């Protein structure tokens, strides 16, 4: 009993309690989307690989190119590599930093929550059938955005996973990422037609090269395009 009560207390404090969520009045507090059809929309890709510039970053770059191609005048893109940042996942649960430790999350959070950001694509290498600890730390830290009146609500979310095996857990990894995005009240989409499944599933042939994975790279392009298309529709109030 006592431990249940403590757990409830913790969940409430962490912004996960039902009552706390209801009090957030999420729908009315979501960023208001202007009906302007000419509005510029930014799509950000976040790479959860600890290896900068490798296969996840390469696949996400292709996804962003496909997003940009939807409407080069209106779509802006940016790739953020978590490998460049200091992120402490434990802070999501309120554990303070050690003296002298750096934390780059606040700046990243401000960037992601900006009104002009219409879509966020989160990519991760598959590590033992799941996302990397770096990607999870990032998604866990986003609890502060949920607590800030669901600052990511109604932004379009997409997921991308790269594994060294063709079926090495990419779809499980996508599900983990998507679950976290849904907890932010984001609008999660998959890769669009013609592949049209749950996101981008990429195979690293073993030489840190994803370009030879014809099917996987088509899911990447279809994901980028789909995120951009839906983000533009959302921005236009459709
Ligand atoms: C600890 C670890 C676990 C891994 N587990 C898997 C796995 O379960 N399935 C898979 O397909 N690839 C696995 N891989 C391979 C990586 O997903 C693959 O090399 C990926 O392309 C790395 O992404 P990056 O180039 O962006 O770092 C693993 C790699 C590491 C380091």
Image: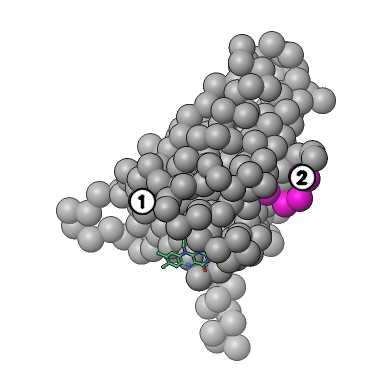
Left or right: 73 in relation to 234 = left
Residue wearing tag 2: 195
Q: Position of residue 106 (x, y in %)?
A: 39, 42
Q: Secondary structure at mark 1?
A: loop
**Residue 79 placement (x, y as % from top left):** 46, 34
- Which quarter of the image is occupied by the C terminus? top right
Q: Is mark 2 within 8 Å of ligand 1?
A: no
Span of residues in magenta = 195-200
Q: What is the image's colouring?
A: one colour
**Would you say the beta carbon of the disc 1 residue lies within 8 angstroms of ligand 1?**
yes
Cα distance in 3D space between marks 1 and 2 = 28 Å
Q: Please tell me how many numbered marks the rendered image carries.
A: 2
In the picture, the disc for residue 51 is: 1
Q: Find residue 93 and report its image quarter.
A: bottom left
Provide residue 131's location: percent of width, then percent of height. 51, 61
Residue at image location 55% in from the left, 86% down from the top: 2
Q: Quadrant of residue 84?
A: top left
Tell me the element at label 2. loop
- Residue depth check, mark 1 versus mark 2: number of the one nearer the observer: 2
Q: Tell me: 212 left or right of 22.
A: left
Above or below residue 145? Residue 137 is below
Circle 2 crowding by C-alpha within 10 Å: few under 14, some 14–19, many from 20: some
User: For this view, does 66 lie left or right of residue 127?
Assistant: right
| Residue 3 visible from this viewpoint | yes
- Mark number, residue 154: none
Residue placed most toward the observer, 187 or 162? 162
Characterize the magenta stretch by its predominant secondary structure.
Answer: loop
């Amino acid at each position: 009993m006592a431990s249940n009560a403590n757990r409830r207390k913790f969940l409430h404090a962490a912004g996960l309690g039902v009552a706390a969520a209801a009090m957030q009045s999420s729908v009315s507090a979501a960023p208001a989307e202007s009906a302007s059809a000419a509005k510029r929309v930014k799509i950000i890709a976040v790479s959860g690989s600890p290896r900068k510039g490798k296969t996840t970053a390469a696949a996400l770059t292709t996804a962003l190119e496909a997003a940009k191609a939807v409407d080069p005048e209106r779509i802006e893109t940016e790739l953020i590599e978590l490998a460049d940042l200091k992120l402490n996942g434990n802070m999501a649960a309120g554990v303070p930093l050690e003296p002298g430790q750096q934390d780059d999350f606040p700046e990243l959070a401000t960037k992601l929550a900006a009104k002009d950001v219409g879509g966020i694509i989160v990519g991760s290498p598959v590590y033992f059938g799941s996302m990397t600890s770096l990607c999870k730390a990032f998604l866990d830290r986003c609890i502060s955005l949920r607590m800030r009146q669901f600052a990511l609500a109604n932004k379009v979310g997409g997921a991308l996973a790269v594994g060294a095996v063709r079926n090495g857990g990419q779809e499980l990894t996508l599900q983990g990422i998507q679950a976290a995005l849904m907890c932010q009240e984001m609008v999660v989409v998959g890769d669009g037609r013609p592949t049209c499944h749950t996101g981008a599933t990429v195979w690293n042939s073993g030489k840190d090269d994803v370009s030879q994975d014809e099917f996987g790279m088509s899911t990447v392009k279809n994901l980028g395009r789909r995120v951009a298309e839906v983000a533009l529709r959302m921005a236009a109030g459709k």
